[in-house]
Amino acid sequence: MNVRPLKATALVAGGAGFVGSHLCDALLERGMRVICLDNFQTGRRENIQPLLNNRSFSLVEADVARDALPDERVDCVFNLACPASPPHYQADPVRTMMTSVVGTLRLLEMAEQHGARFVQASTSEVYGDPEEHPQRESYWGHVNPIGPRACYDEGKRAAETLCFDLVRAGRVDVRVARIFNTYGPRMRPDDGRIISNFLVQALQGREITVYGTGRQTRSFCYVTDLVRGLIALMDVEEAPPGPVNLGNPGEFTVLELAQLIHRMVPGPSEIGFRPLPSDDPQRRQPDISRAAALLGWAPEVPLREGLRRTADWFTLNLGPAARPATA
Ligand code: NAD
Ligand code: UDP
């Protein structure tokens, strides 16, 4: 990283998860030391297994909201600790909110003690079911505060509040990424999010489960593009004075995605329809002009290419008993 000495140390909270494990890989490739902190709620040991023999990597099994945090000196903290898939974060909603709120505050205080930079993995879910399209960082959002998604959405919103309260108080150098739907290798087959569900269903010849009419939209970012954006956000000399959207602006309906995957993966699967979960946002597309201007960042991997890479990974890594988690 441009302002940190070689062998600077990064703490990656949530580092055994889908995005976190790719981030650990990328930081190690840049010559950094990496401490991965994870409680394995949704993360998996196999995501970081190849790193366990690397002397620049260490694993701390701990809960960000409850357990002692590492006392080793760190130069930067990436906070990705929080289940991100609706069925997983809704399974224990109080725990999800505590992870976001208490966990973020504890990590911020740790960063303050160490004088470390901090990147918070926030989410496009802070925009809720948006009335502004595409979503710019200036939009305050439209979130149901008492619905089943609120533990995640409001937890992440409160975490952003803590971040900017500590910035205003001059206590921590914080950068907040609002991440839009991201996919790629190492998603769990039972993750429950759309791309892992559709790919696993198609590869196993099951029904591809479209929720609702499938007319709702999402914009899908390949994981290596996101990781490049998170590192650029940590690297930039001056912290942006507010959150920065990271995502791929290509917008697709859920039905278009189902049809694309159905055509891409040969086999007997058919597209079927299931009820729409409550509070499911109707449209989502990032405006990434701030990320382009402040970080010189833009995604590079087109959807078809990213889906192909992800399908190839699932083909090699799917156990026979793996099943998607469906609503
Ligand atoms: P994930 O569920 O694979 O990863 C989350 C990781 O955090 C897991 O390894 C989990 O075990 C760990 N974790 C959860 N609670 C913890 C706790 N209390 N203490 C320690 N570790 C804990 O999800 P992901 O897709 O890799 O998401 C990573 C981060 O990025 C999350 O904070 C998520 O909210 C954010 N994000 C992801 C997306 C996306 O589309 N992937 C979109 C928006 C935001
Ligand atoms: N979805 C779907 N079938 C599935 C999983 C998800 O149709 O098997 C839909 C879901 O209703 C939503 C979109 O895909 O409209 C994205 O869902 P995901 O859980 O991946 O992310 P989020 O809703 O948090 O953006």
Image (spheres, helix red, strand yellow):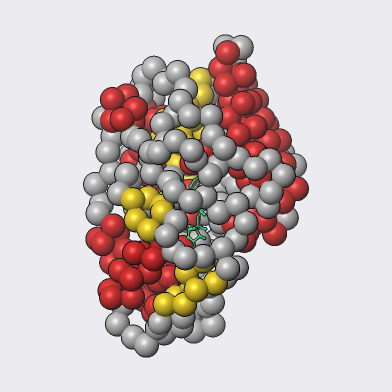
At x 52%, y 38%, the residue is: 127
Q: Quadrant of the C terminus?
A: bottom right
Q: Nearer the viewer, residue 276 or 42?
A: 276
At x 70%, y 59%, the residue is: 91
At x 42%, y 60%, the residue is: 215
Q: Nearer the viewer, residue 75 or 266?
A: 266
Q: What percent of the width, then of the height, locates residue 119? A: 49, 32
Q: Is residue 180 above or below residue 112?
A: below
Asked whether the viewer can see residue 250, the reply is yes
Q: What percent of the width, then of the height, locates residue 107? A: 62, 32
Q: Nearer the viewer, residue 147 or 2?
A: 147
Q: What percent of the width, then of the height, locates residue 67? A: 73, 42
Say how many tags the image has. Answer: 0
Q: Is residue 46 above or below residue 67?
A: below
At x 58%, y 68%, the residue is: 275
Q: Quadrant of the N terminus?
A: top left
Q: Is residue 31 above or below residue 273?
A: above
Q: What percent of the width, then of the height, locates residue 167? A: 56, 17
Asked whether the viewer can see residue 51, the reply is no
